[in-house]
Each structure stands twice: as C-alpha cells, then as structure tokens.
Image (cartoon, rainbow, N blue to C red):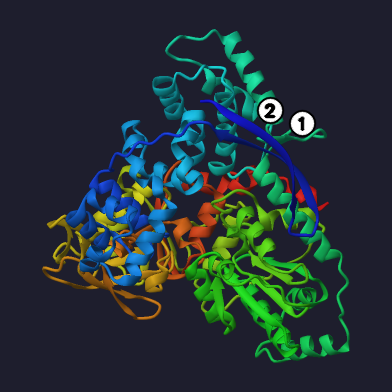
Amino acid sequence: MLGKFSQEQVFRDMADGNAYEQTKITCDIAHKVSIELPITGEEFIRFIAKTKDFEGIGDVYARRLWDKFKQRLYILLDKKETTELESVLTNKQIAGLQKGYEKYENLKFANYLASKHIHPTITQRLFKYHKKDSIEAIKKNPHILVEFGMTFSEADELAKREFKVAKDSLGRLIGAVGHVMRAEVNDKGHTVATHGDIYEKVKELLKNKTTGDEDNDCHDLAAQALQIAGKNLCYYLNPLTGHYHYTPTFLMEQVIAKRLLKLNAKKTLFDERVATAVNWAIESEPLPLEEKQVEAIFSAHEHNVSCIIGGAGTGKTTVLRTVLKAYELLGYNIKAVALSGKAAMRLHQSIGLQTSTIARLLREDPLVCPNDTVVVIDEASMVDIASMYQIINHISPHVRLILIGDPAQLPPIGAGLLLADMLKSNVIECVELDVVKRQKESTGIIEYSAEIRAGIIPSELTKNNIKFNNVYAKNIVETCALLFSESSVETKIIAATNPMVKNINKLVQETVNSCGKEMMVSIENEYQKSGLRLNDPILFIKNNQEKGIQNGSFGRLVAITHKSADKFGVVRIDDTNEKIDIDLDLLDSMRLGYSMTVHKAQGSQFSNVIIALSSRYIKRDWFYTAITRAENSVEIVGTAKQFEDAVTREAESDTRKTYLSELLK
C-alpha cells in the first residue's frame, strides 16, 4: 500500500491539569478500495440492531427493513430517498438510520470483510474506530484486528493467507507484544508484568508452526518484537524494576494516583460547624456506635479522600449513612454511585438518597462544582482502574471522594486493584471496621464468613444456618437442583463457571418448572423456542436504558403473548414490580435466573443461597463473596477437599500484579 507519512508532536491535557507530549504519526493512503458488495441479511440485521448509532432501530425493525428492501436499501440511503421507508419506520427512526448510515458508510463493504472470515462483531468494532478507512487499515496491517477481538493466531493466519505478510513485519511483531500485554490486563487483571511473563509468550506466538522455525529464530524475533514494541509505546519499561507496564493502564494508574495524592494533600476545613454536624449525625443514630465506626465517620469529614472498609456485618452501611447525614446538614451535593444497577439500588435503600450507576454518572454533565460536592463509590472492590480513570476525568479536582467496600471480596473483573492498592499504600486515609455486630438469634453467616475471609477452615462445616452437603463432584449439579426444589422462591444458586450455571439453570427448570408453558419467539416469520418458561426467574445481563433495566437486575416471566411478531411475553421486574413487554432486543439480555456466577451476584443479597463448589476455579475471595450474598441461610454443595481448597487457596487479589500502590507512596 502506497502512502505519505507525516509526523507531529501533540500535547494532551491530563485530568489534573498536567500535560504529556505524544508523537502522532499519520499516513495518507494514496489509493482507496471501492468494493460495493451488499452484506447478507443476518449481518445487516445484527449490525443495525446492536449499534447504538442507529437510534430507535432494534432487531425487529432491522429485520423488517431487510425483508422489504434488501440491497436496494443502500441505494435509497445513498440518494437520501427515504419516503418509501415510511411504510416500515417512523420519521425519528428514519433519521436515526440515515445518521448511522452516513457514519458507517462502509457498511456496504462488510461482505468483503466477511469473505476474509472476519466475524461480524469484529467488523462492527473495526467500523466504529476506522470508519471509512477500515479496509485500507487492515490491508496495511491485518494484525490490528487483534485489537478488535480477533485472536493473534487468527489474525496471523489471515495476514499470511490473504495479504502475504512477512514473519518479521512491523505490524506482526508489535501485534504479538500487544496481544500478550492485553492478555495480562484483560484475562488476569494485571497492570504490570515481568520479562518472564511476556518474553516466552511472545516467542511462542511468533513461532511459525507450519514451517517449523528454529528456536533461535524465534528468540531473535521475540527480542526484536519487544524492542520495536517499546519504541512504539506499546509498553513502558520501568527502569527501576525492569517490569513492563501496558501503556493504557499505566497512564490510567498515573492519572488516578496524581488526583488522589492532590486531594489527599489538600487541607480541609474541619471547624466547629463541621464538628457540630458530625456529632449531631452520630447522636441521631438509634444505637451507640463502635469506636472504629466513630473514627471512620470523622475521617470521612477530615480528609478529601478516604476509604471505609470492612467485612460483612461490621457496619459499613451504618457508618456511611451517618457520614452522609452530616454532609447533607452542611449543604453538600452528594453523588452516590455503584458499579452495578443492583448495587446502586441497594445503596439507595440503605442511605435514603438518590443513587446511580457509575455508567449513568458518566453520561451526565461533568461535575465542575466548587468545594461542596462529595462522590461516594460503594462496593469499591468491584471498581477497576478504567472505571476510576473515567470518574477522575469526569469530576472537578475539588470534589471529595469516599470509597466504601470490602477488599477481601472478589477483585474487579477489569484490571487493577483500586481499593486494595489505596489501602496497601498507607497514604490514603483508610479506616477498617473490624467489630462484627452480632445480632440476637444470629444466622451464623457473618461469623462463618469471617473465618473464611481470614483463611480459616471452620471447625464445624455445618453450623447454625449454614449446611455443608458433602457429595461427589459428579453429583453437585443434581444436588443443587434438589435443594432448590425444597427451598423457597427467594433462593439463588451461585456457581463458579458459566457452563456450570447453564447446566444448573436447565436442570432446575426441568425440576421445578417442567410444566411451565414455553415462550416462543418469531425470527424470520418462524417460531422458535426461547428456553424460557412461564414463571421462570429471569436475570438481566445487560443494561437496557430504553426499558429502564439494569445489568444484574432480576425479574420473572409472568405472561406469554401468543402469535405476535414482535412481542413474545411479559417480564415483571423484582425491585419495581413494573411489567415490561419482551421483544427480541430485550430477549437478548435475558437469561434463566435460578443460578448465576458470583460476579453477577456481587452487590446483591438473597434470603437463601446455594453454593456449588468446583475444583480449580474457586479461591478464598470467591467463596467468601458467595457466602456473604446470603441473609438467612447457606447450603454449600461439594466435597470436603473442595471446601478445604476454596478456603486455603490464595485469593485472586493476592496474586494480581498492579502498580497503583507504588505510585501513591
């Protein structure tokens, strides 16, 4: 591909007012591809329905469009002749379709990408970033497809087969290093890696299995790849430790650290007025507070950034409610957020103030308020550095921060250990609540979970409202289904893997709801089974802003619609009792809700919990998080060896490699 390269220095502002210099290299392509092949109907429907830029057009309307116009739709959109579309769409939908089409004008090139065996999902991501230059971009460097979800092996094979890319090409070498670095971040949650973590994996990726490259050749290529990738800012090599920092996460950790340190160093005005408000809030509590709780309340007012941490039952909610009473009295604007919709709702129920998800906060106007705003982040152990980086860039440097959470729970799904690193640094003010508030006629769950949290195997595996069911591993799924059938409807089963969750959901449905009428869905005028039955519990796995549904919410299938092309049933949302019609768009976010992974359960509480143990997937923080989802009773299902391993295995957060704590020191 011929082209003209140009280079310029770019200065970018950071969230804290500082700036960094970056070299921007651009290439003006001399020739452009013009391939006007229509995409298939299913590819069109999937792309239009799943891309937010096509406002108001879901699966049903996208299918109707294709059924009526097929490839002629492109001609109408190119010429902006939209009168015929009025027979299918509203004026608002037509405007959304035209706007989206103009943004993704290379939609008509998708058949070319499909002919190269590039998955439509990857095509969609490629279009969003490279827009009309997508085809030129992959012709220039097919290994960029790794950045959009393709495996390196698949991109490597495509590069060799379709574009005859040499084994030592710049794009291939940088792509291999980038793939390994991203895997450390995305798959393991690390933000930093050792040479040993990276080198052998890069070498293995660059090995040509078809020609049988000599080991020395692969060593040379791997060394060359690391050198070139470093020069191209794929990573930052720490001169003090020799560790590799993936550039995006390194910048995020730096921005977060700078903001937290600036806030921490800023003097607060803790005068008689503030003290009076805090003391009033403490005295207004119906029960006397523990010494540590009082310390945490004062700390949250004496510092611009602070953390309140503690295990289950130590009174974090009570402390936060009291802290915010005082802030309200002082006239502060309070923004309380949590990562998941379910956690945000529980936070609202606990503190009595308006709350939202982090995603919703980030969609609102930036917080550029003066010194009278405090942002509260609940369940902060779930928050990764990418989310915190976005929050930091969304709020004024003067906004106070309070983080609440339990660092012994599962770490974030994304990279980093925000809360744990803040605690580990010994720089940010953190108060740990360590007194379990025992209640009369205790279920025993809090005391039992505290032992698990500390890595101690309880002396009695069955105690109070916790029962250990010692069964062979092959019988775990069946035992969970049986226990569920004997329990109340306020019971959830927590399992370690999605395949196990799927198996449990299917068996429980057959056990307790085999007679329920199955909901049918219409796809291309043919009715198909949905896998959902009347009265099944439903788990929503995605946000649906249009219908007001949040990821992690629960519902129940309460009605089935007969012989409707676009409405198949009705789901009632547990928290609001709102009834919502089910269309293809909503169906895509619905799953059976008898069982779920602990990540989906995190931030929620259930009356009764059944825990399905398995072997290598369960570690101490997983087990502890699962147990603390229960309010009344816990059934643990598995072998004694699985129980012992789950308690004694190192927590995932203990093995995650991060750098934020060092940047804070």
Mark 1 and 2 residues: CB-CB less than 8 Å, in contact? Answer: yes
Residue under label 2, please give it. 195
Residue visible at 56% across and 50% down in the picture:
414
- From the viewer's perspective, is residue 346 above or below residue 78? below
User: In screen coordinates, is 270 left or right of 476?
Assistant: right
- From the viewer's perspective, is residue 470 above or below residue 590? above
Residue 487's quadrant in the figure?
bottom left
- From the viewer's perspective, is residue 618 above or below residue 231? below
Task: Report x, y in % for residue 35.
Answer: 35, 36
Q: Residues within 10 Å of mark 1 (few under 14, many from 20)?
A: few
Residue visible at 25% across and 48% down in the picture:
42
User: In screen coordinates, is 635 left or right of 366?
Assistant: left
Q: Amino acid at mark 2?
A: His
Q: Nearer the viewer, residue 431 or 643?
A: 431
Task: Report x, y in % for residue 46.
Answer: 31, 51
Residue under label 1, please give it. 242
